[in-house]
Image: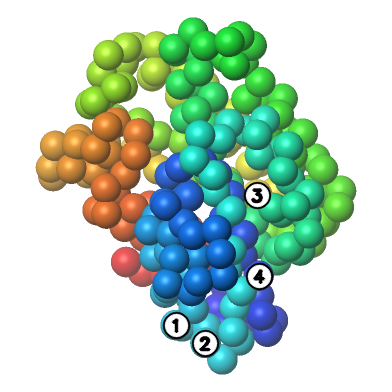
Amino acid sequence: MSDATIPNQYTIVFQGDSITDGGRGRTEDQNHVLGHSYAYIIGAKLGHEWAEKQPVIYNRGISGNRVSDLYARWNEDVISLQPNLLSILIGVNDAWRIVGELPTGATDRFARAYRHILEETKEVLPDTKLVLLEPFILNVGVISENYSRWSELIASYQQTVRELAAEFGATFVPLQHLFHEANQRADAAYWLWDGVHPTAAGHQLIANQWLSVVIGHEN
């Protein structure tokens, strides 16, 4: 994908939890509207490179969301925005509630709810390009308290996302192996300060991979 192949005001929507949210503003203040996550880094780069096309980029991540929470607000925060490209990163809060044995994690709805939002999106927005990011963790912080259970759940979610991407013709963005490789360069907390949430360096790693896989940028 290049600036020669996209239409004017090409619309990208980033969906997810706190990793995507990045402390984004809830107003139209352009200083804060994209937050401080990988979505901001990607938005800044594409906004600059595609300036003549004036792309429209939304961050609709909400901290604490599970995949079922995404569905509850799908009309407002996806369908109504009519994106040309929809990027989704979700899963850690689904696992968090199960590992923590919280009432909201009594059943694991990750696969069925994820499938549901993709089915509806393909039905209502058949021409929207789908991008599914692989959930990830590292063995540090809260994750290290029950790493085996976290690993088991996240591995199953990673497989689910990979399979759904293939089934729905979405672009799959692998991330877990990149964080493991990065962990060889610096300790885990340098990339994911609590095992889940990226630092600035971690967000740059995600953005680089997204741009490489989705847009074809060399990083």
> Which circle marks residue 11 in the picture?
4
Query: Dot 3: what SS?
Result: loop
Left or right of 122 in this view: 150: left
Furthest residue in direction left, as rendered: 186
> Which circle marks residue 170 in the picture?
3
Instruction: Determine contact: label 4, label 2, CB under 8 Å.
Output: no
Question: Few, some or many C-alpha atoms within 10 Å of disc 3 (few <14, some 14-19, many ≥20)?
Answer: many
Q: Which residue is mark 1?
A: 48
Earlier along the polypeptide chain: callout 1 or callout 3? 1
* Quarter of the rendering containing residue 4: bottom right
Instruction: Determine contact: label 1, label 3, CB under 8 Å.
Output: no
Left or right of 190 in this view: 219: right
Q: Which residue is mark 2?
A: 51
Residue 42 is at least partly visible in this image: no
Which residue is painted at 65% across and 62% down in the image? 85
Question: As shown in the figure, which amino acid type bears the numbered disc 1?
Answer: His
Question: Few, some or many C-alpha atoms within 10 Å of disc 2 (few <14, some 14-19, many ≥20)?
Answer: few
Left or right of 66 in this view: 177: left
From mark 4 to mark 1, how far is it between C-alphas?
15 Å
Question: As shown in the figure, which amino acid type bears the numbered disc 2?
Answer: Ala
